[in-house]
Structure formats: C-alpha cells, structure tokens
C-alpha cells in the first residue's frame, strides 16, 4: 500500500491514472458491443440454420413421399399376389423406370419374399425385419431404418406398404429398397460453409444420409450426445462437439409430417465460423482502443508539468462526455508534435468516427421512417381503392339477396358488380405486374410488330374513359408504317397506361393527342394532354413507385401510383426510354416513348373469331370455398350444364369415378391434397382420363402455371375468373364420346 501511495504522489502516475479512467468507459462500451455482436451473429446463424435444416428435411420427405405413392399404386394392382414370375417382371420393369430404388418386392405374411425386381440366388425371408413387422402390425406405410440389403448388397432403407384383403386384413406387404446414395442426392445441392455437417439418422440413430463423405458413414451409429439431441425438441438449437473435435451449432427437423418417417435431419455449422467476423471486429476495436490508451500513457509518462496535467484533464473530460453520449465533444487542443497532441488527435478522431457512425444511424433511421410513411400512404391508398368497388358490390349483392329486385334492376346490378370486379382485378394485376418486373420475372415474347396495330389496340381500350370525360382525342400516324420488335401485349399495356394517365388528369372536355414518328432507327410515340400538368418536383419522381400528383380527399382519379413505374420498367425491357415533360401546373403534360425500330410492313387486320355453339356438358367443380363453388355452379347451371360440386379432393375422386365428368374445374389450394395431385389422380382414372381439366386458382405466378401444366391441366384461369373467357372456352368443348 505504501508503495502504491508513493507511486500516486508522482505526476506521471497521476496522469496515467487519469488517462486510464478516461478511457475506461469507452473500453466497456467496446466490450459490450463485441458481446452483442457475437450474440447477434449466433441468433442470425440459428435462424438461417433452421431454414436450411427444414429445406433438407423437405427434400428427403419428397423422395419418401414419392416412394409411398409408388407402393400405394403397386398395392392396388389386383394380380400382384398371383403368378410370381409375372409379379417379378412387373416389379423389374417398375424398378428400371425408377432407378432410385435398389429393389422392389413382395413379402408374404411368413416373411418369404415371393417376387422381387432383383432375382435372389437363394430364398429370402424378411420376417426378422422390423419394417416388415411394423407394416403388418400398423397396416399402413412404414419407412424402416438402415439395412444393408442381403440380395442387392447395397446400403438402403426399406419402405413398406401392406396389401389388404376385402376384410381390411393384411395379406402381404410390398416393399421398396431405397438406395441411400440416391437419397443423399436430395441434399447434395444444399450449400453449406466449410467444416459444416449434414446428416440424417433413422429411429435407431443409424446414419442414412451425410454430407460430406456419405458412403463412409452409411449405417454407422451417431455419437451418444447427437442421439440424445435428436430425441429432443426438433426446433431447439444445440451445441455439440463431434468425433472430429469440432464444436458445431446444430438444428434439427423431422423428415415428413403425419408419421411419414421416423428420420431426423440435422445440420451443424462450426461455432468458430459463426462468430469469426464478430471476433475479428472486436479484436480490431480492442486493438484500436489499446493503441489509443498506449499513446495516452506515453504522453502522461514523459510530460508532467502543470500545463500538461491540465491538458490531460481536458482530454479526460472530453472522453467522459463522449462515453456519456455527447459525440460532438472535442478536446479543443491545438495539435503539435508532442505526445499529448497525438492523444488529443486520436481522441478527436475517435469521436468524429463515432459521430459519423451515429449520423449514419440517424440517416438510416430517417430513411426507414420515410419508407414506413410511404408504406402507410400506399396502404391507405390501397384500402381506399379496394373499398370503392367493394361498396357497390356489397350493396348490389344485398339488393339481389333481398329478392325484391325487378329483372331490369337485377340486370343493372349485375353489370355494376361485373364492372367493379373488373376494376379490382386490374388493381391486383397492376400490383402483380410491378412485383414481377421488379423481381425480373417478366419474360417478353419479341416478334416484329406494326406500331399501328399496337396503337389501335391501345386506343380501343382507352376510348371508354375518353368518352366518359368528353375528351377530344387526336391521332397522328406516319405515312410510312413503322415497325418495332417487342411483346404486343406488354406494349399495348404501356400505351394504355400512358393514355389512361392522361385521361385521369385532363379535365372534362380537354384534348389528348397521340402521334407516332419514325427517325434514324427509332420510333417515338408522343402522348400530350391539356391537363393539370406537373410541378418540377413531381417531374423528377413521376416514374417512381407510388408517385402521384396531389389530389383531393375524394381521390376521384383513383389508382395506386403504379402505372408509370410499370410503364418505365416495361419500356426499358424493350430497350427503349420514356421521358415526361410539362411547362408547369395547369399547362398539360407530354410523355415520349422511344423504342428501337423503323419502317415496316403495312398493318394487317385479322378477322375476328367466329362464334361457336356450345354443347351441354357434365361438369365437376372442386373448390374448398363454398361460396365460390356455388357461384360457379349457378353460372354453369344457367348455361344448361349438369354441374357436380365437391369441396375436397377425395370427394372429387369419388364423384369422378361415379359420374365420369367431361369437364373438371379444379382449385389448386385444397385442404387435403393439392389440385395438382388431384389432376394427376383424375388423369389416372379411366372415367376422366380424357376429360378437360381447367385450373381455377388464386395462384398466378409463372412457376405455378408450369406445375399445373406438368400435372395434366389443359387450361389455367386466375381468380377472379374472366367469366366471358371461361364460357367461351366451355362453348368450344365437345361432349366426350360415350364409353363402351
């Protein structure tokens, strides 16, 4: 103690102590920040790891579900238990078509394998296999544990399905031996950081899938700690040290739902990799802090007069202010070449860096608030635009429900509902189009197009709004026809949006002009109006999402501020540009669309489609939404068709077998199995193998349409259904030829 007091009596010791006390709060903040960064890194890793684990489990469940479907189909073959040679040939043919399975076979109740896709050199009895015993006992599909095949000499898991007699008693068991090297490919595409571990184990803890080095680990037992973790709660993160001595963070997931299997998937990522960035940042912060502290110590050690002491105290006070949150604090010391000046410079630089980071944080927070405000404004606009058509739809529905409306009132009310539904559909289509364009999911079908044809179709769609507001429309086309390479539907959409935009913001009786010019390999379409014009501030952001001119509270023009943003994206996808100009408010606006193109052929005018009569069909409507199904039933009943309704896929299959419908209108999102699986089931039935299958769904993405095509659908409609298009499709169908 005496030695310590003696040391503190020296000026240098006191200065060192003061500097240490000044730096201490910053050191604490650095340590706390480092701990929080590491905790955050672990939390993010846990979330990402669970998503990867669920993905791996879903991929493997897909393989097992496919096996269950094949075994279920095999179990439904009447003569499977008949002639053994015929049975073996049948299974061999199926095994060749499904190379993922090492073998397929039929097991009698005594365990004897009486027919097999892979012939055995000696009789085989599987009565001792647990998967066989469980399938007989449970009378359902069973995914067994790891087995090294006696006949095929491969690592497999046996998937079994019981054959039931008329009394629902098990008379035999059909099995499929899934090659584990094939199961492993379902997780091969999952990208993992170096040193990570992915494995799947059966109910006994034996490995049936692993990444990396799968074949070296098939059938081996997981270590006891891993076995215990797999038996625990699937979604709980666990830290485990593997046999290789690496500590990893593991997440777990079951393969399949509703008892599909007893398999468990786990993915583990080295803990050192998770916290590496946070530890590096913390080390850099600590290093910087140590350097600052060292400079301060040296300055206190070599300089000990009163002037230096006062300057050091000023530095300590400044550091304390910074630590308390006053990031604008500075030392106020003139910089020189001595150590105290270096310390002052370092402290001020640190404060400036902290202040800059704080400013960045404030800027980010301000941007988030602005984005949140724009989101709230957009949601308010969306709510308003959706309520507008909902009000007449609701009133019209209540009027029709009352039963007191005359035929003229019913007709007028139906027209109102159709128009408002069409308006809501366009709003939703605009939202979906913007989403597809911004995510790069729009595919253009480029063909040579005559610009006059595009203009004619666009003007035809925009004319009703011109007539409603009594606009005078002037169209100017060049003497030499102009041609561009593009998607006809999308270019018409572009021009319609611009024309409608002009009509919305042009007062009653105003003028709208559209002119087409060709020059030097370019085609320009210029739309001008005598409307409200644009202020300079609006011109700079008119093509941004949700950008709109100021409006009255009634929002009489409508819209969500998506049209021009969508127009700009579609024009740029065609390799063109669009520009907006206005002399100011109340002086009109001009939009110029420029596309690559030049002189082309004269426009062609194809003849309209000939009207065709429709036959009366037997129609099956499947939708879990009772109101939607009943509405479609009433529509088809009114057209003279025989309509059958089901609200689940299983009921639909029963009706199809009983009534053999010629047309099936199927929802995709059904409660028991998906509409795509139902379509496959209908195609497999002789009663509906040649029926027309039409998807009627709320899913409108390109990948959804591809899945429907693969499932066997002939046509695809997105809700709300275009009734005229649906009735036109049905009118063109012919009744099926009577079955013999």
Image (cartoon, grey):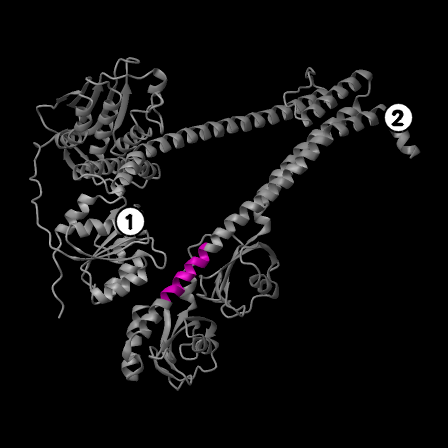
Q: Nearer the viewer, residue 531 or 217?
A: 531
Residue bearing mark 1: 628
- Is 510 one of the magenta-colored residues? no
Report helix, strand or loop for mark 1: helix
Q: Could you tell me residue 698's position as x and y percent?
A: 31, 47
Majority secondary structure of the magenta segment? Answer: helix
Q: Residue at x 76, y 29 (%)?
A: 21
Q: Nearer the viewer, residue 715 or 389?
A: 389
Q: Could you tell me residue 501's position as x and y percent?
A: 26, 25
Report helix, strand or loop for mark 2: loop
Q: Could you tell me residue 299's position as x and y percent?
A: 76, 24
Q: Which residues are magenta?
A: 55-67
Residue bearing mark 2: 9
How dense is the environment of label 2, judged by Cα within 10 Å: few (below 14), some, or many (20 and up)?
A: few
Which disc is residue 381 wearing?
Answer: none
- Is 65 one of the magenta-colored residues? yes
Q: Is residue 67 left or right of residue 200?
A: left
């Amino acid at each position: 103690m005496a030695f310590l007091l003696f040391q503190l009596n020296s000026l240098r010791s006191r200065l060192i102590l003061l500097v240490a006390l000044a730096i201490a709060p910053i050191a604490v903040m650095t340590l706390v920040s480092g701990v929080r960064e590491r905790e955050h890194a672990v939390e993010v890793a846990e979330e990402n790891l669970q998503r990867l684990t669920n993905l791996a489990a879903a991929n493997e469940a897909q393989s097992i579900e496919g096996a269950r479907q094949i075994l279920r189909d095999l179990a439904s073959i009447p003569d499977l238990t008949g002639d053994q040679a015929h049975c073996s040939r049948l299974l061999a043919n199926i095994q060749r078509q499904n190379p993922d399975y090492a073998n397929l076979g039929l097991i009698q109740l005594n365990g004897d394998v009486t027919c097999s896709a892979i012939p055995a050199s000696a009789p085989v009895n599987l009565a001792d296999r647990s998967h066989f015993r469980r399938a007989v006992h449970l009378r359902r599909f069973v995914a067994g544990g790891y087995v090294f095949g006696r006949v095929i000499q491969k690592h497999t898991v046996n998937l079994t399905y019981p054959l039931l007699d008329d009394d629902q008693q098990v008379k035999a068991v059909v099995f499929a031996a899934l090659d584990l090297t094939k199961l492993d490919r379902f997780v091969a595409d999952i990208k993992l950081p170096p040193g990570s571990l992915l494995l799947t184990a059966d109910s006994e803890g034996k490995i049936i899938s692993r990444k990396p080095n799968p074949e070296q680990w098939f059938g081996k037992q997981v270590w006891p700690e891993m076995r215990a973790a797999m038996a625990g709660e699937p979604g709980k993160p666990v830290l485990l040290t593997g046999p290789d001595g690496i500590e990893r963070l593991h997440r777990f997931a079951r393969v399949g739902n509703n008892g599909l299997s007893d398999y468990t998937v786990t993915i583990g990522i080295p803990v050192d990799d998770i916290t590496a960035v946070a530890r590096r940042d913390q080390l850099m912060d600590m290093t910087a802090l140590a350097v600052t502290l060292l400079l301060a110590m040296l300055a206190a050690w070599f300089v000990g007069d009163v002037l230096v002491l006062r300057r050091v105290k000023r530095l300590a006070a400044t550091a304390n202010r910074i630590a308390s949150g006053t990031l604008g604090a500075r030392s106020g010391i003139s910089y020189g070449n001595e150590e105290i000046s270096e310390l002052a410079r370092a402290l001020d630089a640190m404060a400036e860096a902290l202040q800059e980071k704080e400013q960045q944080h404030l800027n980010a927070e301000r941007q988030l608030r602005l984005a949140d405000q724009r989101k709230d404004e957009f949601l308010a606009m969306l709510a308003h635009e959706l309520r507008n058509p909902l009000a007449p739809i609701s009133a019209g529905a209540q009027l029709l429900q009352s039963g007191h409306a005359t035929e003229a009132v019913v007709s007028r009310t139906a027209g109102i509902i159709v128009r408002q539904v069409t308006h809501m559909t366009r709003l939703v289509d605009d939202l979906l189009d913007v989403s597809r364009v911004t995510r790069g999911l729009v595919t253009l079908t480029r063909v040579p197009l005559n610009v006059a044809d595009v203009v004619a179709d666009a003007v035809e769609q925009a004319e009703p709004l011109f007539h409603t507001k009594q606009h005078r429309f002037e169209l100017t086309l060049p003497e030499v026809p102009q041609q561009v390479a593009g998607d006809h539907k999308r270019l018409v959409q572009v021009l319609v949006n611009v024309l409608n935009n002009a009509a919305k913001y042009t007062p009653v009786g105003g003028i709208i002009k559209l002119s087409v010019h060709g020059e030097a390999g370019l085609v320009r379409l210029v739309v001008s109006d005598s409307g409200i014009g644009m202020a300079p501030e609006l011109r700079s952001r008119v093509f941004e999402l949700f950008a709109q001119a100021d409006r009255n509270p009634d929002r009489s023009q409508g819209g969500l501020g998506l049209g021009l943003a969508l127009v700009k994206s579609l024009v740029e996808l065609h390799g063109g540009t669009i520009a907006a100009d206005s002399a100011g408010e109340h002086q009109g606006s001009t939009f110029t669309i420029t596309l690559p193109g030049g002189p082309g052929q004269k426009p062609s005018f194809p003849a309209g489609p000939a009207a065709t009569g429709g036959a009366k069909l037997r129609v099956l409507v499947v939708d879990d939404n009772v109101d939607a199904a009943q509405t479609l039933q009433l529509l088809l009943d009114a057209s003279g068709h025989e309509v059958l309704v089901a609200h689940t896929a299983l009921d639909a299959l029963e009706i199809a077998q009983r009534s053999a419908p010629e047309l099936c209108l199927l929802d995709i999102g059904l409660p028991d199995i998906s509409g795509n699986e139902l379509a496959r089931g209908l195609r497999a039935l002789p009663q509906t193998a040649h029926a027309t299958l039409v998807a009627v769904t709320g899913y409108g993405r390109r990948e959804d349409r591809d899945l429907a095509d693969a499932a066997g659908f002939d046509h695809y409609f997105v809700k709300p259904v275009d009734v005229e298009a649906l009735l036109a499709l049905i009118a063109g169908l012919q009744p099926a030829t009577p079955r013999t």
